[in-house]
Image (spheres, helix red, strand yellow):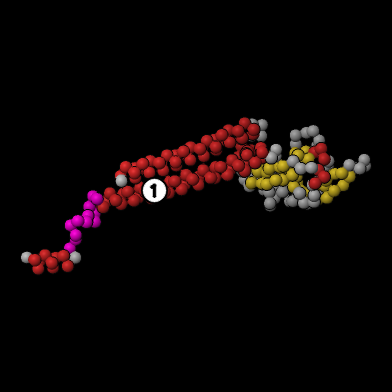
Amino acid sequence: MAADLTERLLGGEADPTEPASGTPATKSQRGRKRTAAGAVVGRFLSMAAMLVSLFAALVLIVVPVATGSQTYTVLTKSMAQKYPPGTFMVMKPAPFDELKYGDVITFQLYSGRPDVETHRIVGFGSTQQGEKTLITKGDNNGANDENPVRAIQVKGKLFYAVPYVGFVANFLGNSDRGTWTVIAAVALIGYGAITVYRSVRKTRSRDNAAAGAT
């Protein structure tokens, strides 16, 4: 009897103290592992979405407001290929005397009127009265702009540009852009706050569950 028992143990029979593969206990463990892996992926995606939202709020809303910049959308192909239609441009105020060759500026086509253009400085000139003027040209245009640009017409110098985001601004409409900007800022900040709150709450719940199990 003792020899027979020894042979069965040496022959690799399953240890009765370990759950066999496919038993309810093993399936439960696998299910918990899959749930834990899914939770990790979910937290990663939530954090990634939060970071993207916060970055968008910073680049598109917070920085322009904090620097006193104005935002515009490229509507034509005059500045392609670098700034195609739909590019969101942030134009920061700059002293007229500090503008130099190669700077991209936004200026009024006619002083006091709302129509603006965004082109590159390709030269300098002056009026008969000695007032300094700028010669501008679109990167994709074959000739310089017809009229020189005076200091009073300049709205700002290019701070940075974000491709394609301008399409959203155009869809929302220029007249209501300020209102939509506030709504977008509140929505993005709110989303980030909710994501952080959920992440912290889940972490505390897991810690409490682990403490209770021990």
Q: Is 199 part of what is drawn in magenta?
A: no
- Is 112 situated above or below 81? above
Along the horizontal axis of the image, is 189 left or right of 8? right
For label 1, the crowd category at 10 Å Cα-Cα, with few meaning under 14, some 14 to 19 and many 20 or more, is few
Quadrant in the rendering for residue 54: top right
- Find the residue positioned furthest to the left: 1
Kind of residue sitting beneath label 1: Gly
Quadrant in the rendering for residue 57: top right
Provide the secondary structure element on which disc 1 rests. helix
Where residue 129 appears, as percent x and y from the top left, is 92, 40
The residue depicted at 19 percent of the width and 65 percent of the height is 12
The residue depicted at 66 percent of the width and 34 percent of the height is 174
The residue depicted at 76 percent of the width and 49 percent of the height is 103
- In depth, the one of 20 and 197 nearer the eye is 197
Q: Is 14 part of what is drawn in magenta?
A: yes
The residue depicted at 74 percent of the width and 47 percent of the height is 104
Where residue 111 appears, as percent x and y from the top left, is 81, 35
Where residue 59 appears, as percent x and y from the top left, is 62, 43
Quadrant in the rendering for residue 157: top right
Observer able to see residue 209: yes
Q: Main secondary structure of the magenta part?
A: loop
- Is 18 situated above or below 210? below
**Residue that numbered label 1 is attached to:** 38
- Find the residue positioned furthest to the right: 128
Along the horizontal axis of the image, is 85 left or right of 122? left
Magenta stretch bounds: 13-25
- In depth, the one of 125 and 96 nearer the eye is 96
Observer able to see residue 106: no
- In depth, the one of 116 and 43 nearer the eye is 43
Along the horizontal axis of the image, is 37 left or right of 117? left
Where residue 11 appears, as percent x and y from the top left, is 17, 67
- Quarter the N terminus occupies: bottom left
